Amino acid sequence: MIDAHLHLHDEAFKDDINEVLLRARKSGVVAFVNTSTNFKDAVACLNFSRIYDSVYPCVGLAPYSDLTEIDSMLQLIEDEPDIVAVGEIGLDWPYEKKPAQIEIFKKQIEIAKELDLPVVVHSRSAGKYCIEILKEMKVEKVLLHSFDGGIKHARVAFDLGYHFSIPVTVIKSPQKQQLAKEIPEKLLLLETDSPVLNPNGGRNEPANLVISRDFIAELKGLEPKTIESITEVNTRKFFKI
Ligand SMILES: [Zn+2]
């Protein structure tokens, strides 16, 4: 399996990262798409990938970060050839500065298109608007991570060929269960968003991917092994890793 979205360079892992990675590998997680949210975090994310094997950096300015960092972020994305995707970028409506969020989202979509990189989208209470912008800008390689929007918006995204990474919270969220049930197999990826989104509270870690693998297998009437291979193939293809 591949954890398509998480934050391994986070403070929460600083004392036991080696054990966390070992547990992940023992449970069958073979690679990680390590994601950043602001400039300092992006530098840490890139450094992390240089130290650890099979950890691929995804770099971008999240809508809840300091949006004045956009120019340095765009420069960093342009300068670093190892980046596998631009993210997490998107819209987070509970935060303020909606027009600025939209502008920064669009700038990062532009650079992703220029560099032919996929985008990893964070949307909070803004799924419909994210999909509208992506559609309008004719973006093709899209991963909607931990999508919280309604199924009718997700269906629009399915038709556009957008991918979704489903987090472990699927075991508790009826919205994510419906998404997992309806999503075409070729668009399905798995994520933990570690260290956050542990459905049982506390720190999340990539070894927990087995929980959603088993749960989604049951939902879709498939073997866990099948979910493993489908999602691994989809993730490798999507990020070209
Ligand atoms: Zn995240």
Image (cartoon, rainbow, N blue to C red):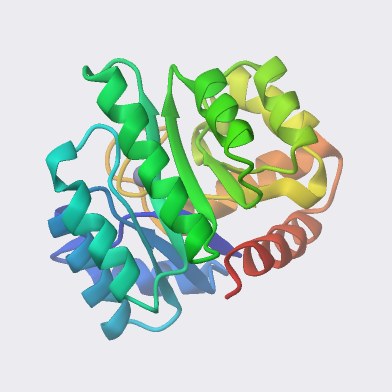
Task: Residue 113: give x, y in percent of width and height.
Answer: 52, 56
Name the residue at 30% across, 61% down.
Answer: 8
How many numbered marks does the figure carry?
0
Name the residue at 40% across, 51% down.
Answer: 87
Name the quadrant where ligand 1 sits: top left
Task: Residue 86: give x, y in percent of width and height.
Answer: 42, 56
Q: Is residue 3 visible?
A: yes
Quarter occupied by the C terminus: bottom right
**Vertical relation: 102 (above or below) 109:** above
Task: Residue 13: give x, y in percent of width and height.
Answer: 21, 60
Left or right: where 221 falls relative to 233 = right
Left or right: where 14 falls relative to 161 = left
Name the residue at 47% across, 41% down.
Answer: 121
Left or right: where 226 falls relative to 114 = right
Task: Residue 96: give x, y in percent of width and height.
Answer: 21, 17
Q: Is residue 197 visible?
A: no
Left or right: where 168 falls relative to 55 = right
Name the residue at 68% across, 42% down.
Answer: 162
Residue sitting nearer the eye, 182 or 218: 182
Quarter occupied by the N terminus: bottom right
Residue sitting nearer the eye, 85 or 16: 85
Res 197 quadrant in image: top left
Res 179 quadrant in image: top right
**Vertical relation: 67 (above or below) 37:** above
Residue sitting nearer the eye, 156 or 13: 156
Residue farthest right in this picture: 221
